[in-house]
Image (tube, rainbow, N blue to C red):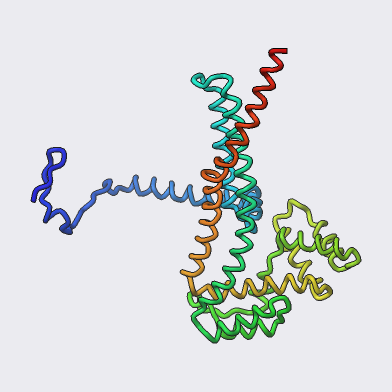
Amino acid sequence: MMITLNTTSYNAPNLFKKEKQSFKGLPASGAVSKAYGKVTDGIAHGEGWLASTKPVQKLIDFLKDKNYQQHIVATVGMVLSGFYMLDTARSKTIEKDQKMPLIMNQGIVAAASTVGGYTLDNYLTKKLSKFTETFNIANIKDKEVQKIVLDLHAKKDNLEKADIEKLFAKIKNVEENKTYTWDKDIVEAFEFNSGIKKQLKAELKKSPNDETIKKVLEEIDKIPKKDVDKNIKAGEIFIKNMKDSNFMKKLFSKQAFDNSLKLVTNGEKNLAQLMTGLKIAKSIMVFGLIYRFISPVVATPIANNISARLEKKKQLEKQA
């Protein structure tokens, strides 16, 4: 059997035979090697310098406890909608009286898509976090470790040092061959973020006489905003005063459980990668679905209705 494409013949049976391929690059020379070395060194130093700058550190700190995927997708959607609106306004092929309805349509769709995307994505994030917790526990292969984690989960609002140490006695980091400790992997690893601060403020509104929370928030607010170690120092203030507040103990206990569960699943890379991928895919799918399908169907009739009313008003004004 012969297959002929563009006057070149291929023998079908031999088409899939494995053959050794050889590739030749540029001839190695001292000048090329030195130039290559300088370029790679320059890139490495440049990346290192960029990562150490305050703006990049602030960006990393800002994104650390935020779902940046949804912000990226929403920003891209709004920017593209803005370009569509600008292109419509400048178009010479679209009738003048049709431009405003189209621009309004695009603007309403963009606004409705963004609001709807954030609302649905935040709702699903809360549901997914509960599902992730259950899913991770269910997939722990060591049944003895799984039982300990289930016990921790049952009282995760009020965990003690002994509870966590019981778990740490059974697990370790396989790759680095190291064990975990309460002081280093729970206390030092505690992360004070904007979410915890919001919860403290909300609790203070409910209990305005809670002197401990009031004191903690006041001390945290005294830390300069430009201090790159602000979150670390805030965490130290939180830990120092935690023993005097049941609410703060509860917040710390929850994070201690979450961190312990992450350490348990460290050896299960496929599981961790699956959950990370699911989180990213969720935001992209939600915003994509709303931007491309739901909002255009819902927003188009609204935009047409509004633009028709405005057009009618203009016509009446002209007649008057």
Q: Residue pushed farthest left?
A: 1
* Nearest to the observer: residue 90 or residue 24: 90
Residue 31 appears in which quarter of the rendering? top left
Residue 296 appears in which quarter of the rendering? top right
129 lies above or below 68: below
Q: Position of residue 50 (x, y in %)?
A: 57, 48
* Nearest to the observer: residue 52 or residue 132: 132
Q: Position of residue 264 (x, y in %)?
A: 56, 76
Q: Position of residue 106 (x, y in %)?
A: 58, 34
- Is residue 39 visible to the viewer in this orientation of the structure? yes
223 lies above or below 304: below
Residue 88 appears in which quarter of the rendering? top right
Q: Quadrant of the C terminus?
A: top right
- Residue at the (57%, 68%) spot, across then down: 132
- Residue at the (11%, 56%) spot, across then down: 13
* Nearest to the observer: residue 209 or residue 289: 289
Q: How many numbered circles does the render carry? A: 0
178 lies above or below 32: below
17 lies above or below 90: below
- Is residue 46 visible to the viewer in this orientation of the structure? no
- Residue at the (72%, 58%) spot, across then down: 194
- Residue at the (71%, 74%) spot, across then down: 253
Q: Position of residue 276 (x, y in %)?
A: 52, 62
Q: Residue pushed farthest top?
A: 319
